Amino acid sequence: RRVRPPLDSFIEVLVNGEDAPAGCEVDERGEAWVLFQVSWLPPGRSPSFNAINPRELTWLDTLHTTEEGAGWRRLSRPPPPDRGIALFARLATRLPPSKADTRRLVSLGFEPPYDLDKVALRLFADDSALLAEARRLVESLE
């Protein structure tokens, strides 16, 4: 039985090459492995999980642990720094924040209810493209 990857870990997801972000290597089958961050693990023994692309903030619902190697794989290179993207995705999609999320938000000076624009500005202030994507995600979910 396969184990779900841990919350906030980075994985690669196999996507259609047409849906891959610019700069991704597309193979001869027209597919590409794209970086995602695990953003939600349903409670209990559910074999599924959700992930978010840390550059374009595109959300993937329901990846299954049984698809490792076919639909997703563990990251084979060192992961990028955790910028708080999965945390932001959980807030934006109204999923319950983890205990670690709550600690991080408190350390940044935030208390519930969280203002998504202010959280995005604090997390992504040094990356205007990522900040724009965060705002787009919030608008798409309203």
Image (cartoon, helix red, strand yellow):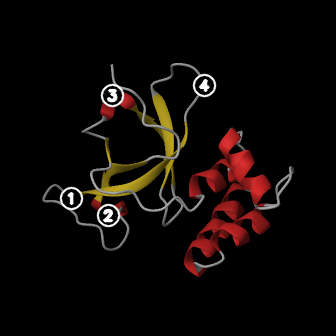
Q: CA distance from mark 2 to mark 1?
A: 8 Å
Q: Taking 22 as reference, is 6 above or below it?
A: above
Q: Quadrant of the C terminus?
A: bottom right
Q: Amino acid at mark 3?
A: Thr
How packed mark 2 is, by other alpha carbons closer than 10 Å (few <14, some 14-19, many 20 or more), is: few
- The kind of secondary structure element at disc 4 is loop
How packed mark 1 is, by other alpha carbons closer than 10 Å (few <14, some 14-19, many 20 or more), is: few
Q: Any mark on residue 43, and which?
A: 4
Q: Quadrant of residue 132?
A: bottom right
Left or right of 55 on screen, residue 93:
right
Q: Earlier in the sequence, mark 3 or mark 2?
A: 2
Look at discs 4 and 2 and give the one toward the viewer. 4
Left or right of 105 on screen, residue 87:
left
- The kind of secondary structure element at disc 2 is helix
Q: Amino acid at mark 1?
A: Gly
Which residue is found at the position 70% from the left and 42% from the top? Answer: 97
Q: Which residue is mark 2?
A: 18
Look at discs 1 and 3 and give the one toward the viewer. 3
Left or right of 37 on screen, residue 117:
right
Q: Which residue is mark 3?
A: 66
Look at discs 3 and 2 and give the one toward the viewer. 3
